[in-house]
Amino acid sequence: VVWLCGRRCYLVVWLCGRRCYLVVWLCTRRCYLVVWLCGRRCYLVVWLCGRRCYLVVWLCSRRCYLVVWLCGRRCYLVVWLCGRRCYL
């Protein structure tokens, strides 16, 4: 457990074995970041800020990854990045 950013922000790192571990970043009560790594290639990043808006990033391989932005039921953005080029 690492205490950063005064009294409100702190970082929690959970290690279980050599391959899989969970990183949770809490800053204020509403917003937090959850990173799940299992293996060397694939991992999931979830950003939650409140109940309505959240960001999901799925990385599998070094070059290609998917970014999904969901804000409520109506608005969403999907960006596929592969290398240096961006696709919307």
Image: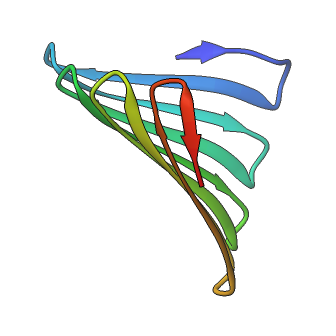
Q: Relative to residue 44, is residue 88 depicted above or below?
A: below
Q: In this view, does 72 lie to the left or right of 68?
A: right
Q: Relative to residue 88, is residue 13 depicted above or below?
A: above
Q: Residue 52 appears at what percent x and percent y?
A: 69, 73
* 58 and 50: which is toward the camera: 58
* 3 and 73: which is toward the camera: 73
Q: Relative to residue 1, is residue 32 depicted above or below?
A: below
In which quadrant will I find the C terminus? Answer: bottom right
The residue at the point 14 percent across, 18 percent down is 17
Q: Relative to residue 20, is residue 73 depicted above or below?
A: below
Q: Quadrant of residue 76?
A: bottom right
Q: In this view, does 71 lie to the left or right of 38?
A: right
Counting every numbered tag in the picture gives 0
Question: Of all residues shown, which one is farthest toward the bottom?
Answer: 74
The residue at the point 27 percent across, 27 percent down is 61
Q: Residue 18 appears at what percent x and percent y?
A: 15, 13
The residue at the point 17 percent across, 25 percent down is 39
Question: Of all residues shown, which one is farthest toward the right?
Answer: 6
Q: In this view, does 74 lie to the left or right of 47?
A: right
Describe the colour scheme in one phrase: rainbow
The residue at the point 51 percent across, 25 percent down is 12
Q: Quadrant of residue 72?
A: bottom right
* 49 and 12: which is toward the camera: 49
Q: Residue 80 appears at what percent x and percent y?
A: 48, 48
